[in-house]
Image (spheres, rainbow, N blue to C red):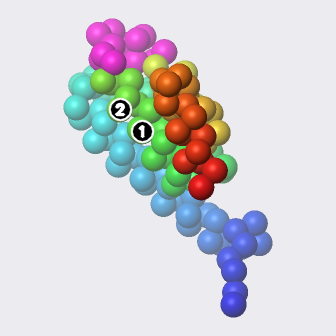
Amino acid sequence: MTFLNLEEDEHCLKHISKDIGQVVLARFNRFADKCIQDQALRDELLALIKPKEDRTYLYVKLLFDCLELRMREGIPRVPWGWINVFKTLPGTVKEAYLGFLSRVRECHRDDVRRLFKI
């Protein structure tokens, strides 16, 4: 059995990074089409979430889940409100998970711990 080690295959890593960038762009455009009309603001916000070398598909999914959650709490009415939202997005998968877990009600936390142990 052969396993792919991305650190050893720069060509593959380059293509996966490019694909993740395309996923970010597509997800961002779907998100922005719902609530951000100003193109200059869209460009500025997209620059804040450009994928780095350590970004993964999981991170991108969690990032946009965070954005959707924040939208449900209320859409910023001014550009700097959006900029603040994007600047406070989680920078890692761990930060994203911790953000979601912090929203779990105290009475449900034992259930969540049990699920993670399974």
Side (left or right) of 64 relative to 93: left
Label 2 sits on a secondary structure element that is helix
Q: In the rendered structure, which amino acid carries the disc numbered 2?
A: Glu
- Residue 43 versus residue 13 in the image, above or below: above
Separation of residues labelled 1 and 2 (CA atoms): 6 Å
- Residues marked 1 and 2 touching at CB (< 8 Å): yes
Looking at the picture, does residue 77 appear above or below residue 36?
A: above
On the image, numbered disc 2 is attached to which residue? 68
The residue that label 1 is drawn on is 64
* Quadrant hosting residue 36: top left
Q: What range is drawn magenta here?
A: 73-84
Residue 97 in view: no
Picture coordinates of residue 17 (x, y %)? 57, 58
Residue 48 is labelled as none
Residue 27 in view in this figure: yes
Residue placed at 44% from the left, 28% from the top? 45
State which quarter of the image contains the N terminus.
Answer: bottom right
